[in-house]
Image (spheres, rainbow, N blue to C red):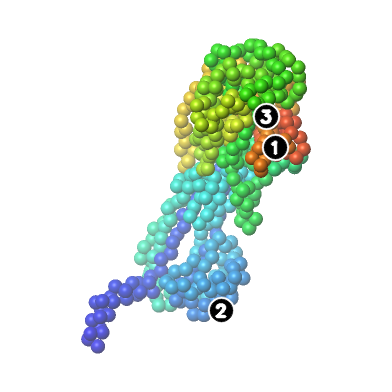
């Protein structure tokens, strides 16, 4: 007996003391409320709602099987799963989370020994799918996509803890430790909830009208890079995880690349004008077919040999004329200008998963003789929609490359972004602006993008999509329109891309009308004067 007492008092003392403490004390975690996400007008887009968590102290549950049968219907769980939670080793087991307070109350009323209900939080997006792709999702360990992931450290609070002394029956006697939780910081976005909701509706309507695979759009302020709206149709309902499709949650404007087609022609024109090689009035002889090595280049509309100024080449979206301008610019300068306009690089937008896109640099193994004929017209280069918006913003704001962004402030403190970098002169930007305004005219390819009472500048794009065989398809296209409004004092850049429309092909037919609808809606909402 003496030896056994010595063994228990010395050798097993630590284990026994820990077991006694586990039976005499209850440690309850106090979850911290996650910061809210609001739009630019302080309208809540994501917030934490009070919810209940069911917790078990397994060794105190007298009849686990019976308790599981009572709890399962209330917790919407299978009885064997509940039983597993009630029979784990140790003095603490989380049985279920995210219950409504009514469901939590029902569990309390069962009065099962060893079962308690703790208040907590559940993430809610009150507008459903509005802005859901950009906002992102929250998992057990915090943000897993979108703004929720990008700013997870700021949104996440500091949890608290309560340690209670308890009697053998588990009844609390006193509080040994009490640390209150600290809520996370609120994040205010540049998104405008009204613009976002209407943008999504217009994109969905465009998708249905043309039977497209997907339609994406972005609305951005050209001077600051503040994003007012961004979405892809089809979207998803973040409040219904049972129908969750990860592909629909992707922020395609930032993550997905595509061959931009003719909306990319501004890069060639900007470089040639900035270097003084051409002016908008410089004339080129444009043949019906241009031979570049083994490539025969045609324009979308057949024509004989024509003499067109640079402005008309852009207005007519002539592939041949654009390549002739690029040949005068030269291959090395062309790729330098593509890089200067931010392609092949991250824009710095504050969302995870941004793609850099790709283009073959002059002198690299990927460069070939026909690259001088492909790149100027937006083929053989991949870009994201946000890169396109940034490039057009540089023309709209007078020649400065800015940082696109979603967040205005964190915890009430404004977020400071890197200053813009000048890429072209103000004079070059004004020349391009005049040319792009002609595109959205009766004679231009983008006349469907007009907005009553406002001047519009922009460019249509129609690019062949590479099919399953690795070759350009003659039936699959990416149709687009990129531009800004009012062209005389630009307030917003809008880019619309229509992925593989079943009916309609050209950007001027498929994407330009959506641009017009988005612009009309946003101009009225923001109270921007005609001009």
Q: Residue furthest bottom?
A: 1
Q: In the visual, does 173 lie left or right of 434?
A: left
Determine the residue positioned at 44% across, 69% down: 92
Using the numbered discs, state the Cα–Cα distance from disc 1 to disc 3 in whole angstroms. Answer: 16 Å
Residue beneath label 3, please? 461
- Quadrant position of residue 368: top right
Q: In the visual, does 33 lie left or right of 207?
A: left
Residues under numbered marks 2 and 3 in contact, where contact means CB atoms less than 8 Å apart = no
Query: Nearest the camera: 276 or 435?
Result: 276
How many marks can you see? 3
- For marks 2 and 3, give the one nearer the viewer: 3
Q: Which numbered disc flags the more N-terminal residue, 2 or 3? A: 2
Mark 3, other Cα within 10 Å: few <14 / some 14–19 / many ≥20: many
- For marks 2 and 1, give the one nearer the viewer: 1
- Residue 449 in the image: state x and y as whole percent: 71, 27
Query: Tag 2, which secondary structure?
Result: helix
Using the numbered discs, state the Cα–Cα distance from disc 2 to disc 3 in whole angstroms. Answer: 66 Å
What's the mark number on residue 66? 2
Q: In the visual, does 39 lie left or right of 414?
A: right
Query: Nearest the camera: 192 or 456?
Result: 456
Mark 2, other Cα within 10 Å: few <14 / some 14–19 / many ≥20: few
Determine the residue positioned at 47% across, 42% down: 411
Query: Tag 3, which secondary structure?
Result: strand
- Residue 183 in the image: state x and y as whole percent: 46, 51
């Amino acid at each position: 007996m003496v030896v056994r007492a010595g063994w228990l008092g010395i050798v097993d003392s630590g284990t026994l003391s820990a077991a006694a403490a586990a039976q005499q004390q209850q440690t309850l975690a106090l979850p911290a409320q996650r910061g809210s996400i609001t739009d630019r007008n302080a309208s809540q887009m994501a917030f934490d709602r009070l919810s209940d968590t069911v917790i078990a102290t397994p060794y105190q549950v007298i009849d686990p099987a019976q308790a599981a049968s009572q709890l399962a219907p209330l917790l919407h769980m299978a009885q064997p799963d509940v039983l597993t939670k009630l029979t784990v080793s140790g003095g603490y087991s989380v049985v279920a989370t995210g219950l409504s307070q009514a469901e939590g109350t029902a569990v309390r009323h069962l009065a099962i020994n060893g079962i308690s209900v703790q208040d907590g939080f559940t993430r809610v997006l009150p507008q459903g799918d509005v802005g859901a792709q950009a906002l992102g999702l929250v998992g057990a360990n915090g943000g897993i996509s979108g703004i929720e992931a990008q700013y997870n450290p700021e949104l996440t609070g500091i949890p608290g803890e309560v340690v209670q002394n308890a009697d053998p029956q588990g009844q609390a006697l006193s509080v040994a430790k009490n640390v209150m939780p600290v809520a996370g910081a609120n994040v205010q976005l540049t998104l405008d909830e009204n613009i976002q909701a209407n943008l999504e509706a217009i994109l969905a309507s465009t998708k249905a009208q043309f039977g497209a695979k997907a339609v994406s759009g972005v609305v951005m302020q050209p001077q600051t890079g503040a994003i007012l709206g961004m979405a892809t149709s089809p979207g998803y309902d973040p409040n219904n995880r049972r129908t969750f499709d990860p592909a629909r949650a992707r922020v395609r404007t930032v993550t997905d690349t595509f061959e931009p087609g003719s909306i990319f022609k501004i890069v060639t024109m900007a470089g040639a004008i900035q270097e003084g090689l051409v002016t908008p009035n410089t004339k080129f002889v444009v043949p019906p077919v241009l031979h570049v090595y083994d490539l025969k280049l045609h324009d979308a509309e057949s024509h004989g040999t024509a003499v067109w100024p640079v402005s008309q080449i852009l207005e007519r979206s002539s592939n041949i004329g654009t390549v002739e301008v690029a040949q005068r610019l030269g291959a090395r300068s062309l790729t330098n200008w593509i890089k200067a306009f931010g392609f092949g690089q991250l824009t710095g937008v504050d969302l995870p998963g941004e793609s850099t896109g790709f283009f073959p640099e002059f002198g690299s193994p990927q460069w070939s003789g026909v690259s001088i004929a492909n790149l100027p017209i937006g083929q053989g280069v991949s870009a994201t929609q946000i890169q396109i918006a940034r490039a057009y913003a540089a023309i709209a704001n007078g020649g400065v490359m800015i940082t696109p962004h979603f967040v205005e402030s964190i915890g009430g403190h404004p977020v400071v972004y890197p200053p813009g970098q000048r890429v072209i002169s103000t004079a070059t930007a004004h020349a391009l602006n005049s040319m792009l305004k002609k595109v959205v005219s009766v004679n231009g390819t983008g006349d469907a993008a007009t907005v009553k009472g406002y001047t519009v500048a922009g460019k249509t794009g129609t690019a062949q999509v590479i099919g399953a065989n690795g070759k350009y398809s003659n039936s699959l296209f990416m149709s687009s329109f990129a531009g800004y409004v009012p062209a005389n004092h630009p307030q917003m850049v809008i880019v619309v891309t229509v992925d593989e429309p079943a009916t309609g092909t050209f950007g001027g037919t498929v994407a330009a009308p959506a641009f017009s609808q988005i612009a009309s809606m946003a101009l009225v909402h923001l109270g921007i004067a005609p001009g």
